[in-house]
Image (cartoon, rainbow, N blue to C red):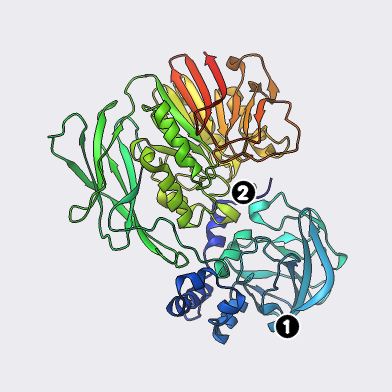
Amino acid sequence: MIGRRRLPWVVAVLLCVLPMATSAAEPTVRDTVEGIVARMRASLEQQQMLAADRETVERFVTPADRAVLGTRYWCFDANVPVVVSVMRHTGQATAPFWLQERGFTKTDLRVRNEEYEYEVWQKEFPAGRVGLGINGFELHRPHYFVSVGPQQRGAALRLSRFFPASQRQHVMRPGASTYHDWSSLVLTEVPELLRGQVLLPTIRGRAREAHLIGGFRATPYPSSDRPDLVALTWSEDPRTTQTVQWRCSSSAAAGAVRWRPAARSSAPWRTVRGTAVTLSDSRILNDPRVRWFTATMRGLRPGAAYTYAVGSPSGRWSAPATFRTAPQRPAPFTFVWLSDTHNRDSTAALLAQASRKYPDAAFCTVSGDLVGMGQYRDDWDQFFQHMGSFASRKPVAPAIGNHDTIDGLGAGLYRSLFGLPANGPRALQPERAYSFTYSDTLFLILDCTESTEVQKPWIEQQLRTTTARWKFVVFHFPPYSDPGEYADIVRDWCPLFDRHHVDFVLAGHVHELQRTYPLRAGRAVKRPADGTIYLVTVSVPQRPRMDPRPATTLLRSQPGPALFNTLTVDGKRLVMRVYDADGRVYDELKVTK
């Protein structure tokens, strides 16, 4: 499955940032690109920038820019004279400008993996600093990668002082991986001349660092001085706290939330200031900078309704909305489950139907791929807009999908936009995985785009110590949907689900409706009491797939419409239903403990 492999977060953070210079006095690739953008904005209209082609972009690139973009993007020191080979995808329409300008020669050599073919460009460098350039001005996901060999056969080669600093070194040979964010994509053909050299892998997302051709966007929902995109989450105890996020234009210096019991309209407002971050993206032409606020209301009563509004004591406030805290003791509740919303407007219609059928639903969870491009703030503008009034009244509990941290670029924007519990595995960044208990049900939200192994101890501890009657686990990749594709999840997580009897695993990714038999050790068992049921849903129109239905799967529906699931927990009884936006039922399941 394309793009499913994970990238350790330290590597992701260090590789995804726009390159910095090796010293304070040197121009950076980031600053150089921003300078080009600024000159374009000063000379072109918005529509001209949205339609900018190579010729347009090149008009604003100076010789000094080309020097930086051609040498300071990917750098390292070699202790001996070397031959550097750049493997460029043959499907890339235009070769990076610096290859010929910097003296690289295109050879007859070819390198292949299971998906792509690469042509090989080579150049000799003396011992010392080697500097390489950008992947191009377009967004081309099969980024080039590099191998390095000594000019003198048998010389002891050492590479050091890498930029980006987190660079890994592999051996150039069949079976080697070239992309950190797709480690299962390995080389199948390597010329004998290159075998044994030092292979420098990368991430596909680095192509975005100089993405100017087709890289400019306009958000359909620009910010204003009025708070909008209001969404509830939980970062602490759902019984006694409520976290809220919202957006304002970049002129908003401060923000706050005020609240009072819904039944006491004459009660004085309580107010707490929010924390804010400025989110900047110069390639969003009509709204490049916004302020994103987060605040947590504390000291609430369990099972109580509150009215609140967000804004600024000296500015404008949002329309009042009402939420209800989680109950103190076990009580019946319903939650809504979406997956693979991809910032599409189908989300709005699904949640509108969910609100009609279940007006008292407690919250909504989304099992990954909330947006198409996790680093595009305008995609998130659309996601929150489509969540609409549902998210201002019902908390959202998301899980990270591969599109939310796409191409190895990390989940920094996701983590800025959601205020989530910081109670997850210590080996992960806070909020990438977390847990909460609602009524008598435990929810574990996992990050399957990160290492499955490092999350095992935390999952074990959460499942071992909970006293909850029901256990749900939510993450993006479905472990039994494509046999062998998710072997690490099956190896590291599913035995824990068996050992501690997780009732349901909620996943997505494959864009279809699925329900397995109750499974234990990967095999069907007769009763839900003896195994875990693995569910998959999709909240965009389902795409057809030709592969056969897995033997573990009881129900599989595709192609079909966008769907949402509701799960009602009432003591020892659970009812799940699957609906489309018109309210038609596509599946129903009843389980009694």
Residue sitting at x 73%, y 52%? 185
Q: Under tag 1, what secondary structure?
A: loop
| Position of 299 relative to 182 (above/below) | above
Image coordinates of residue 452 in percent, x first then y, are 60, 40
Q: Where residue 165 sits in the image (x, y, percent)?
A: 57, 65
Quadrant of residue 290 within the rendered picture: bottom left
**Residue pointed to by mark 2:** 6
Q: Position of residue 153 (x, y in %)?
A: 84, 73
Label 2 residue SS: loop
Residue at the location (73% across, 83% down)? 103
Name above or below for residue 26 compared with residue 271: below
Residue at 69%, 20% in the rendered image: 524
Q: Which residue is mark 1?
A: 103
Q: Between 528 and 466, which is closer to the camera in this rendering?
A: 528
Q: CA distance from mark 1 to mark 2?
A: 35 Å
| Residue type indicated by callout 1 | Gly
